């Protein structure tokens, strides 16, 4: 089982920056995609940034240019640099990783995983 632990959230003023981290541990054979999502109370969880196994990155239109996703494969850690924070960015941020945890003959995946972190609160004051 793959576990994800987020860190780096906090309280900042409008225009400030934060760097969120998501550390993965457990048995990982290959990763398909990693991403950051956010959710406000009573609302659906939305994707803000995703990085694919080939390095391709995608961002939600509302954060494009302000959020930057990156990963350090040697450390099994993903990051989200958030700049020019706005009050509407206030949410709980979750990281997610999908991939294969066990492979069999010919490297065919025997067990997929789809793991979520516990969330980290980001609060932006006006």
Image: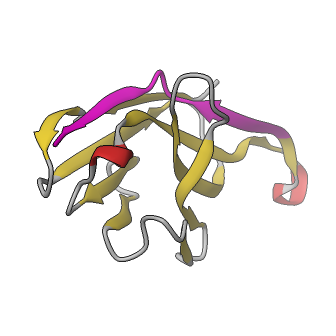
From this view, report whether residue 53 is shown above or below residue 36. Answer: below
Foreground: 85 or 110? 85
Range drawn in magenta: 111-126
Q: Tell me: 69 left or right of 3.
A: left
In the image, farthest residue toward the front? 126
Name the residue located 33 percent from the left edge and 27 percent from the top edge: 121
Name the residue located 23 percent from the left edge and 55 percent from the top edge: 85
Report the predominant secondary structure element of the magenta stretch.
Answer: strand
Name the residue located 62 percent from the left edge and 23 percent from the top edge: 42
Q: Assign the C terminus to one quadrant of the image.
A: top left
Foreground: 25 or 102? 25
Foreground: 29 or 77? 77
Give the total number of marks visible in the rendering.
Answer: 0
Q: Tell me: 117 left or right of 65.
A: right
From this view, report whether residue 17 is shown above or below residue 123. Answer: below
Name the residue located 13 percent from the left edge and 58 percent from the top edge: 15
């Amino acid at each position: 089982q793959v576990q994800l632990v987020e860190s780096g959230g906090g309280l900042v003023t409008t225009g400030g920056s934060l760097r969120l981290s998501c550390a993965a541990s457990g048995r990982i054979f290959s990763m398909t995609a990693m991403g950051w999502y956010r959710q406000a109370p009573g609302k659906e969880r939305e994707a803000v940034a995703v990085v694919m196994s080939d390095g391709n990155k995608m961002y939600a239109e509302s954060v494009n240019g302000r959020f930057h996703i990156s990963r350090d494969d040697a450390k099994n850690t993903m990051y989200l640099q958030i700049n020019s924070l706005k009050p509407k960015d206030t949410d709980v941020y979750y990281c997610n990783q999908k991939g294969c945890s066990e492979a069999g003959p010919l490297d065919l995946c025997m067990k997929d995983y789809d793991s979520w972190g516990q969330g980290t609160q980001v609060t932006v004051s006006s």
